[in-house]
Image (cartoon, helix red, strand yellow):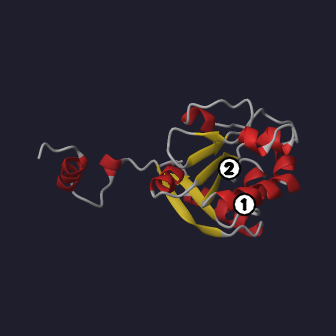
Amino acid sequence: VNTAVAFAQMDRRVILIDGDLRKPRLHKIFDNTNRIGLSNYLAGKSSIDEIIHPTKITKLDLIPCGLHPPNPAELLESRRFIDLIRLLKEDYDFVLVDSPPTLAVVDASVVSTRMDGVVVVIRANKTTKKSLLYAVETLRKAKAPILGVVLNEVPFSHNGYYSPDYHGYLKGYYSSSKQ
């Protein structure tokens, strides 16, 4: 989500797709409806125009998951999904798909093979090295184009690289001043 927002703030047209058809969450983050979305389009029940929702962030659109389908992996493997990504790439600078965890279900591996690049997102103090290595190996076996890894949810106050004084400096630097 933060990557999509950052690209939009750089004046790029971005579409963020909730590709987690089992446990969708992006509609909640963006305070949007989840009634019509990706699953509806992939099942042939909605048009592309019906599933694209604007967000409050300029240049950032959202395709929520839609109603929970009985066959998520099958829908993501469909020709319709490939065609959707191709069409979106014509109108957007970045097409980002938030998929379920690689180790949880096959869906992430399926989605990864349809992307130009994959970024593995791991959670600080949650994702083990063993899990990360297994996830990367799973994606490699699927021939996913892995671009790198993002470490998420790093507790800022526990970052031991900089001294506490530096964190105080950052707080003062980024807070509003009366100058």
Q: Quadrant of residue 31?
A: top right
In the rendered image, which residue does mark 2 sit on?
Answer: 99
Q: In screen coordinates, is 117 left or right of 13? A: right
Q: Quadrant of residue 121?
A: bottom right
For label 1, the SS is helix
Q: Amino acid at mark 2?
A: Ser
For label 2, the SS is loop
| Residue 5 position (above or below residue 94) | above
The one of 17 and 49 positioned closer to us in this rendering: 49
Locate residue 124, reporting x and y percent.
47, 51
Q: Residue at x 65, y 66 (%)?
A: 117
| Residue 37 position (above or below residue 171) | above
| Residue 22 position (above or below residue 17) | above
Judge whether residue 130 can be spotted in this image: no
Quick one: label 1, few (<14), some, or many (20+) residues within 10 Å? many
Locate residue 114, reporting x and y percent.
76, 62
Q: Residue at x 25, y 49 (%)?
A: 174
In the rendered image, which residue does mark 1 sit on?
Answer: 112
Report, in whole angstroms, how far the alpha carbon at label 1 lies from the one at label 2. 9 Å
Closer to the chain start, of discs 1 and 2, is: 2
Mark carried by residue 61: none
Q: Residue at x 55, y 36 (%)?
A: 29
Q: Residue at x 11, y 47 (%)?
A: 179
Q: Amino acid at mark 1?
A: Ser
Locate residue 91, reporting x and y percent.
67, 57
The one of 77 and 11 positioned closer to us in this rendering: 11
| Residue 40 position (above or below residue 126) | above
Tell me whether circle 1 and circle 2 mark residues in contact (CB < 8 Å): yes
Locate residue 89, reporting x and y percent.
69, 60
